[in-house]
Amino acid sequence: MVRSTIETRDLCRQRAMEYDQAVQVYRLFGVRVARYPRDTVFELQLKPADTVIELGCGTGPNFWCIQHAIGPTGTLVAVHLTDARLRSRRRAQHERIGER
């Protein structure tokens, strides 16, 4: 079955909401979900000044680990199917650094 662009985006939005809810449930049960991005980035053996393209980045839960590994001279390119997820990440980042 081939989906249209709109159908694909709608499905992605639905799955993203389900994912976010599942993560919250995991946290309620004490699962330390924050360790998974850290462990994954460690296995990539990134170095300062590396360039990373993260496809399907969602709201960017892996960004802090990647940015720590590649440092201020590295480049992180975020790609996601729905612009709403990227806007959400951008908003959260601005709030964290006080640029709102």
Image (spheres, rainbow, N blue to C red):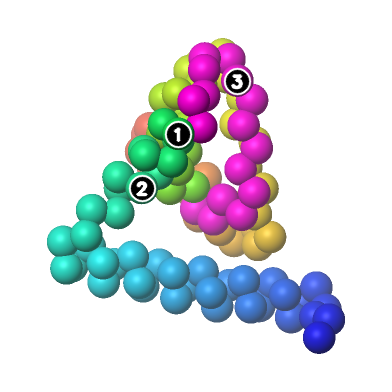
- Quadrant location of residue 99? top left
| Disc number placed over residue 50 in the picture, else none | 3
Residue 71, position in %: x, y?
Answer: 48, 18
At a point 68% along the width and 60% down the height, the residue shown is: 81
On the question of residue 99 being in view, the answer is no
Residue at x 22%, y 60% (from the top left corner): 31
Say above or below: 81 vs 51: below
Residue lying farthest bottom?
A: 1
Residue that appears at 58% across and 72% down: 13
- Residue 83: mark: none
Q: Marks 1/3: CA distance?
A: 14 Å
Determine crowd level at label 2: few under 14, some 14-19, many 20+ residues with C-alpha closer than 10 A.
Answer: few
**Residue situated in front as seen by the camera: 98 or 67:** 67
Residue linked to disc 1: 43
Mark 2 — residue? 36
Dominant SS in magenta:
loop
In magenta segment, residue 54: yes
Instruction: Say if 25 sits above or below 90 in the image.
Output: below
Q: Which residues are magenta?
A: 44-59
